[in-house]
C-alpha cells in the first residue's frame, strides 16, 4: 500500500447563506472525495464528515494516498489491412499513429477484436503526486457545488456563494500549493471574527479542530449544535421551564454562529394574552430565539437567544434581544385586538372579493362547495352535519384577518382563537384549525373526527378543482400544491379509518366545480391520489412491487387498501409466495393469448389428468374457505389459505398441457386457470411479486 497522510482543506469566506450552508458543505466534501477517487487516489474517510461554520467550508480526511497508482493506458490504432502495405511495410496511417504515441511502429503491440487484428499502444507511467493533483481536484469540486445565487466581487471574474478570503490546504504537515479564486493556499486559518480576529496557524491536520477551538471557533457542526442544545436547555431550566427546540430553528441558529452562547431573556407577561402561536412564530421565524414553556407546555414570558460571542456585558446583550422583540409583539397584539373587534364571521364577508382561482371563482365560492361536501360526508363519518356545516362556513374567514396577513403560517390557528372568542363550540373552533392538517411532511392528521371531515372536504375540492382547471402538476411544477393536498387527503382517509371510496368522493367534488371534469379525469385524479401514497408506504418498508400489486386490484377504501397491503407483506414472506406469484403471472400470459371468450364454469367431465382434477378440487375448497374471510376483509386469512394451493398448482403445470389439441379440453383447462387466477388475485395482483 502506498504512503498515506491526512488531508485538511479549509475555504474561508464571508458569512455564507444560512439555509444553503449544510448543503454547500456536503457538496464540497463529496466533491473533493469524489474527485480524488476518480483519479485513483485512495481515500480512507473513516467517520469524517463536512466541517463548516458561517465563514468556512472544510474537510478533514484521516488518510489519503500521497500518489496515484501506476497509470495504464491503451490507445487503439489502425487495423492491419490499413496499417501495412502489401510488402508488410507501415503505411502513413500506422506511421502517424506511432509518431503520436512517441514510439517506433515496431514497438507497438497488436490485439484482435471482432473486426480483426489491429495495432495498439500500451503504456505504463508512474502515478502523479496527490499534491500536484489537488488544485484540479479543488477546482472540480467547487465548480460542481450548487451555489444558490453566485456572487462576484472585486475586479476579477470569480463567482461563488460569498467572497473567498483564505485557503488552507495541508497534506500531512506540508502546505499544498493551490489557488482558488485568486487566493493562494497556506497553513493559516482565521479565528472568530470578534473574539480572535487574527490568523491561526495550523501545524498539522490533526491539530485543526483544537486550534480553531482555541480561537473561539467550533468548526464541527455536530459539536456546535450539541452545545446550543445544552446551553438553551440549561437557560430554560434556570427559570423553571423547558425550552422549545424545533429542528429547523436549531439548524438555522447552528449556521449563524461559530461560538454559541445562550442568553436567558424575558418579555412583558401582558403579551401572553396574544395567541401563543403568533409569539412563537415571531421568536422562531423572525429572531431565531428559543421559547420557554412551562410544565404543561404553555408558553411563558421567558425565551433564550444565542449570541455569537462571549460578551463582557451579558445584560446589554439581553436588553438588545428583549428590545428587538417588543415591537413585533406589540404589532401582534394590535392585530389580534383589531381582529377581535371585527369578529370571525364578519371577516368572511370579504371572501367574495378574493379570487381563489380564475376558472374556479372566489374563495367564497370554494367555501360554498366545501360546505356542501362536508354535509355529504358528515353523516357517513359519524359527525354532526350542523357542526360540520358551521365549521366549513368559518374555516377560511381568518384569511381576511390582520393576524394571518402578518403571519400566514397562522391560518386556521388564528381562526380557532377568533371562533372561541366569538362563542363558537370548541369542536367547531378546533376543526377550523385542524382542517389545515397535516400542514407539512411528517405532521399528524387532524385529531378530531370533525377536523378530519373538514380536512377531507377541503382537499377534495382543491384537487377536483385543480384538475378541472388544468392545473395538474408537471415535473417539479405544482403551483396549486396538488401533490401535497393529495397526500394530505390520502393520509387523512387512511389514518382516520374512513371507509369511503376515494373515487366516489372525488366524483362528488368534481360535480360541484364550475369547470367540468369528465369521468376519465376523475379516474386519473383517483390514481393520482393513490400514487401519493407510494413514498408514504416506501418509508414503512413496502416495496414498489407490493404497492403495485395492491394498486392493481379493485379496493373499497384506503383502509381496505392498507389492509390488503399489510396482508400481502405477510404473504410475501411465505416460502410459497414466489412460486404462486410466478404461476399467476404465467396464467395471465396464457389467458391473454386466448382467442375468444373463456367459459365461466369448469366441466369436471372434461378432465383427462389427475393433476387437473386435484387442482380443481383444491381451488373449489380454497374458494369455499376464503369467501367468508373476503367478506369480513380478513385478507391475511385469505392469502394464508391460498398459499396452500402451491402443491396442486406446481403439479398441474408439471403434468398438464394447457393447450391440448381437443378444443373442449383446452377450453376447460383455460376456465380452470381463470378460476384459479381470479381467486389468487382476490386480494392483490400477486404476479407483481414475481421477478
Image (cartoon, rainbow, N blue to C red):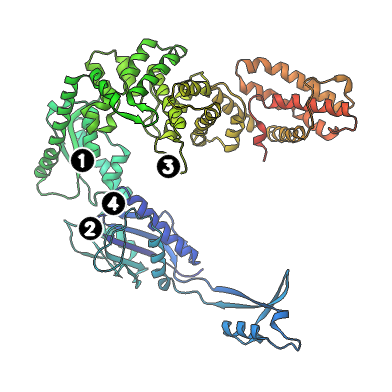
Q: Are marks 1 and 3 in contact (CB under 8 Å)?
A: no
Alpha-carbon span between mark 3 and mark 2: 48 Å
The residue that mark 2 highlights is 214
Residue 133 placement, left or right of 311: right
Q: Are marks 1 and 4 in contact (CB under 8 Å)?
A: no
The residue that mark 3 highlights is 477
Q: Nearer the viewer, mark 2 or mark 4?
A: 4
Alpha-carbon span between mark 3 and mark 4: 25 Å
In the rendered view, tell whether residue 130 sits above or below residue 399. below
Q: Whole-percent x and y of residue 577?
A: 68, 32
The residue that mark 4 highlights is 17
Q: Nearer the viewer, residue 626 or 216?
A: 626
The residue that mark 1 highlights is 287
Res. 611 visible in picture: yes
Whichever of callouts 3 and 4 sits on the residue coming sooner in the sequence is 4
Q: Whole-percent x and y of residue 549?
A: 62, 32
Q: Quadrant of residue 616?
A: top right
Amino acid at each position: 500500500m502506498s504512503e498515506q497522510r491526512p488531508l485538511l482543506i479549509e475555504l474561508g469566506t464571508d458569512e455564507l447563506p444560512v439555509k444553503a450552508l449544510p448543503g454547500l458543505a456536503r457538496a464540497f466534501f463529496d466533491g473533493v472525495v469524489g474527485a480524488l477517487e476518480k483519479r485513483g487516489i485512495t481515500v480512507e474517510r473513516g467517520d469524517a464528515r463536512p466541517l463548516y461554520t458561517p465563514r468556512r467550508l472544510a474537510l478533514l480526511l484521516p488518510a489519503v494516498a500521497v500518489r496515484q497508482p501506476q497509470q495504464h493506458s491503451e490507445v487503439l490504432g489502425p487495423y492491419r489491412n490499413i496499417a501495412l502495405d502489401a510488402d508488410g511495410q507501415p503505411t502513413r496511417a500506422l506511421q502517424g499513429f506511432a509518431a503520436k504515441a512517441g514510439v517506433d511502429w515496431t514497438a507497438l503491440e497488436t490485439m484482435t477484436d471482432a473486426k480483426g487484428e489491429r495495432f495498439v499502444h500500451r503504456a505504463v507511467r508512474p502515478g502523479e503526486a496527490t499534491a500536484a493533483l489537488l488544485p484540479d481536484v479543488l477546482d472540480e469540486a467547487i465548480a460542481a457545488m450548487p451555489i444558490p445565487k453566485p456572487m462576484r466581487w472585486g475586479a476579477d471574474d470569480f463567482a461563488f456563494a460569498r467572497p473567498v478570503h483564505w485557503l488552507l490546504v495541508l497534506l500531512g504537515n506540508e502546505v499544498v500549493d493551490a489557488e482558488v479564486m485568486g487566493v493562494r493556499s497556506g497553513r493559516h486559518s482565521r479565528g472568530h471574527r470578534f473574539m480572535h480576529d487574527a490568523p491561526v496557524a495550523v501545524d498539522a491536520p490533526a491539530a485543526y479542530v483544537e486550534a480553531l477551538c482555541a480561537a473561539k471557533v467550533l468548526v464541527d457542526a455536530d459539536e456546535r449544535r450539541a452545545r446550543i442544545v445544552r446551553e438553551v436547555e440549561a437557560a430554560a431550566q434556570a427559570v423553571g421551564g423547558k425550552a422549545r427546540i424545533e429542528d429547523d430553528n436549531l439548524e438555522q441558529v447552528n449556521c449563524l454562529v461559530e461560538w454559541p452562547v445562550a442568553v436567558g431573556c424575558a418579555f412583558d407577561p401582558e403579551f401572553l394574552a396574544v395567541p401563543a402561536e403568533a409569539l412563537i412564530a415571531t421568536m422562531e421565524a423572525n429572531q431565531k430565539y428559543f421559547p420557554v414553556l412551562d410544565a404543561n407546555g404553555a408558553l411563558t414570558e421567558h425565551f433564550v437567544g444565542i449570541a455569537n460571542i462571549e460578551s463582557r456585558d451579558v445584560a446589554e446583550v439581553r436588553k438588545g434581544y428583549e428590545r428587538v422583540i417588543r415591537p413585533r409583539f406589540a404589532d401582534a397584539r394590535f392585530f389580534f385586538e383589531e381582529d377581535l373587534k371585527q369578529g370571525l364571521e364578519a371577516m368572511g364577508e370579504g371572501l367574495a372579493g378574493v379570487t381563489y382561482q380564475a376558472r374556479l371563482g372566489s374563495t367564497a365560492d370554494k367555501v360554498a362547495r366545501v360546505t356542501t361536501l362536508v354535509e355529504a360526508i358528515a353523516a357517513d363519518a359519524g359527525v354532526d352535519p350542523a357542526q360540520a356545516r358551521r365549521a366549513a362556513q368559518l374555516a377560511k374567514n381568518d384569511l381576511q384577518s390582520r393576524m394571518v396577513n402578518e403571519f400566514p403560517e397562522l391560518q386556521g390557528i388564528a381562526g380557532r382563537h377568533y371562533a372561541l372568542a366569538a362563542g363558537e363550540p370548541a369542536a367547531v373552533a378546533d376543526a377550523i384549525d385542524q382542517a389545515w392538517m397535516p400542514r407539512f411532511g411528517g405532521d399528524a392528521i387532524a385529531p378530531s373526527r370533525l377536523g378530519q371531515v373538514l380536512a377531507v372536504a377541503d382537499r377534495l375540492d382543491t384537487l377536483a378543482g385543480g384538475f378541472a382547471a388544468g392545473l395538474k402538476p408537471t415535473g417539479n411544477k405544482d403551483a396549486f400544491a396538488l401533490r401535497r393536498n393529495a397526500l394530505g387527503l390520502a393520509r387523512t382517509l387512511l389514518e382516520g379509518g374512513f371507509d369511503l371510496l376515494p373515487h366516489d368522493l372525488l366524483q362528488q367534488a368534481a360535480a360541484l366545480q364550475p369547470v367540468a371534469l369528465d369521468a376519465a379525469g376523475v379516474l386519473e385524479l383517483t390514481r393520482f391520489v393513490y400514487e401519493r401514497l407510494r413514498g408514504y408506504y416506501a418509508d414503512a418498508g413496502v416495496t414498489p412491487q407490493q404497492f403495485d400489486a395492491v394498486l392493481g386490484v379493485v379496493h373499497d377504501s384506503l383502509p381496505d387498501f392498507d389492509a390488503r397491503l399489510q396482508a400481502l407483506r405477510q404473504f410475501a414472506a411465505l416460502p410459497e409466495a414466489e412460486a404462486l406469484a410466478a404461476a399467476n403471472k404465467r396464467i395471465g400470459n396464457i389467458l391473454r393469448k386466448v382467442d375468444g371468450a373463456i367459459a365461466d364454469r369448469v366441466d369436471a367431465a372434461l378432465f383427462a389428468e389427475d393433476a387437473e382434477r386435484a387442482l380443481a378440487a383444491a381451488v373449489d375448497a380454497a374458494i369455499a374457505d376464503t369467501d367468508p374471510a373476503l367478506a369480513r376483509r380478513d385478507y391475511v386469512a385469505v392469502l394464508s389459505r391460498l398459499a396452500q394451493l402451491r402443491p396442486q398448482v406446481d403439479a398441474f403445470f408439471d403434468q398438464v398441457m394447457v393447450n391440448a389439441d381437443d378444443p373442449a379440453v383446452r377450453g376447460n383447462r383455460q376456465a380452470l386457470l381463470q378460476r384459479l387466477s381470479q381467486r389468487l388475485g382476490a386480494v392483490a395482483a400477486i404476479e407483481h411479486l414475481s421477478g
